[in-house]
C-alpha cells in the first residue's frame, strides 16, 4: 500500500498497523516544515517501509509513484483550519489541487487501486442537530472545510466518472501519540498535553460545555484500514469518530488529572475563535460500524494516559 502524508500522525499509525499485519508499505511525504511529518513517527518500521520524500502536487512524480499499489491512503494535507483562513491559496493548492493530481495519476497509471481520502468533520461547520449523520447540511465555517468538501467531491467524481474505487472519511477530533507538538493549530487534546507537561495552565473558553467527539489515533487508524479492506465501501463517505460526545471542560479535566498539579483556567471567548466554533459535535457512526464491523476501543481517559506516557518518553523528538 501507498500512504501519502505517511510520516504524519494518522498515516504513520496506519503504517505501523499495516506493517504488523505483513503489508508492503510505501510512504510518500513532503516533510513540510511545521506540518506533522516526523521520521521518528516511523521508529521501528523505517527499515521495513519504502520512504519517498515527495509532494503530491508534483504530477510527474505521482504518475511514477502510484503504479503497483492495491491501496492508497490519501492523507497528505494542510491540517490547520486557522491557517486555511489566513493562507487560503496554499490550502487550495494542497488540499484540492494536490489531491486532484493524485486522482489524475491514478486514473492514468493505476485505475485499479482503492483510495481512501481523509476528510474532516469541518465539512459540516455549524451544527444543526446531533448526532450528526452523513446527510447533515454543509455549513462550512473555514476554507479548510470548504476544500475538504471539494476533495470529497473530487474523489466521488472519479468514482462515478472513471470507476476509481474511492472512499472518504470525515474524521472527528483525533488525538494521541505521533501528532506534532510544536504549535497549537492541530488537535487541542495534544496541545493541552504539551502545556501540562510544560507545567503551563490549560485555558478553557466560556463554560467549556461544548461537546466534542475525541477519537484515539490508533482506533482511527484501525477504522481507516477497516474501510479500505471492506468490500462495498467504494463511492461512499463515512463519519469516523467514537460516536460519543464529551464536554470540552471534561477533556481538559482529564488531561489535568493525568498530570497532577496542572491548573485549569476559564476565560471569555475571544471573538475570532467564536466565529469558527461549530457548536456541539457528536458524530453518528452507525454507517461505518455496519459496513466494517469496526468499533472504537479506547476511552478518553486511557487514550490521554497513553498520550501523556508517549510524550513524556519522547518529548525531545516533538518539542
Ligand atoms: N489531525 C486532525 O485534527 C485531522 C482531523 C480530520 C482530518 N484530518 C486529515 O487527516 C490527514 C492526516 O492528518 P494528520 O493529523 O496525520 O496530520 P499530519 O500533519 O501529522 O500529517 C499530514 C502529513 O502530510 C504531509 N503533507 C502535507 N502536504 C503534503 C504534500 N503536498 N505532499 C506530500 N505530503 C504532504 C505532511 O508533511 C504531514 O506529514 C490530513 O489530510 C488531515 O487534513 C486530520
Image (spheres, grey):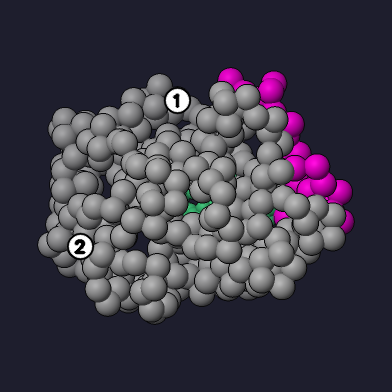
Specify the segment rendered in magenta: 44-69
Q: Is residue 197 left or right of residue 225?
A: left
The image quadrant that residue 125 belongs to is bottom left
Q: Is residue 165 above or below residue 64?
A: below
Q: Is residue 207 left or right of residue 168?
A: left
Q: CA distance from mark 1 to mark 2?
A: 31 Å
* Residue 314 badge: 1
Which residue, given by chain and number where applicable, does mark 2 sit on? 210
Residue at (50, 43) in percent of width and height: 226
Q: Position of residue 120 (x, y in %)?
A: 46, 61
Q: Is residue 45 magenta?
A: yes
Q: Residues within 10 Å of mark 2 (few under 14, many from 20)?
A: some
Instruction: Please tell me which residue lies in front, 96 or 286.
Output: 286
Q: Is residue 182 left or right of residue 278?
A: right
Q: Is residue 81 above or below residue 4?
A: below
Q: Are marks 1 and 2 in contact (CB under 8 Å)?
A: no
The image quadrant that residue 303 belongs to is top left
Kindly state the secondary structure of the residue where label 1 is placed. Answer: helix
Q: Mark 2 or mark 1, which is nearer the start of the sequence? A: 2
Amino acid at each position: 500500500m501507498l500512504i501519502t502524508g505517511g510520516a504524519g500522525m494518522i498515516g504513520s499509525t496506519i503504517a505501523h498497523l499495516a506493517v504488523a499485519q505483513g503489508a508492503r508499505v510505501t510512504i510518500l511525504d513532503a516533510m513540510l516544515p511545521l506540518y506533522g511529518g516526523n521520521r521518528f513517527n516511523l521508529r521501528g518500521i523505517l527499515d521495513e517501509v519504502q520512504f519517498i520524500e515527495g509532494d503530491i502536487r508534483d504530477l510527474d512524480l505521482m504518475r511514477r509513484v502510484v503504479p503497483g499499489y492495491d491501496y492508497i491512503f490519501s492523507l497528505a494535507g494542510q491540517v490547520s483550519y486557522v491557517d486555511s483562513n489566513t493562507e487560503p491559496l496554499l490550502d487550495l493548492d494542497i488540499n484540492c489541487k494536490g489531491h486532484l493530481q493524485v486522482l489524475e495519476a491514478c486514473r492514468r497509471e493505476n485505475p485499479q487501486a482503492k483510495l481512501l481520502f481523509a476528510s474532516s468533520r469541518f465539512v459540516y461547520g455549524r451544527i444543526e442537530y446531533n448526532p450528526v449523520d452523513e446527510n447533515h447540511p454543509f455549513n462550512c465555517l473555514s476554507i479548510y472545510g470548504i476544500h475538504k468538501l471539494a476533495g470529497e467531491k473530487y474523489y466521488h467524481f472519479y468514482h462515478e466518472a472513471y470507476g476509481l474505487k474511492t472512499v472518504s472519511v470525515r474524521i472527528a477530533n483525533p488525538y494521541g501519540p505521533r501528532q506534532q507538538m510544536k504549535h497549537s493549530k492541530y488537535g487541542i487534546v495534544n496541545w493541552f498535553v504539551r502545556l501540562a507537561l510544560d507545567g503551563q495552565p490549560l485555558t478553557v473558553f466560556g463554560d467549556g460545555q461544548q461537546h466534542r467527539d475525541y477519537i484515539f489515533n490508533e482506533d482511527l487508524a484501525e477504522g481507516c484500514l477497516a474501510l479500505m479492506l471492506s468490500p462495498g465501501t467504494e463511492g461512499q463517505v463515512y463519519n469516523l469518530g467514537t460516536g460519543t460526545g464529551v464536554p470540552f471542560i471534561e477533556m481538559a479535566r482529564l488531561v489535568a488529572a493525568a498530570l497532577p498539579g496542572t491548573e485549569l483556567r476559564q476565560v471569555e471567548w475571544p471573538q475570532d475563535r467564536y466565529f469558527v466554533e461549530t457548536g456541539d459535535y457528536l458524530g453518528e457512526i452507525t454507517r461505518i460500524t455496519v459496513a466494517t464491523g469496526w468499533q472504537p476501543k479506547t476511552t478518553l481517559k486511557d487514550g490521554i494516559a497513553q498520550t501523556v506516557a508517549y510524550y513524556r518518553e519522547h518529548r525531545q523528538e516533538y518539542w
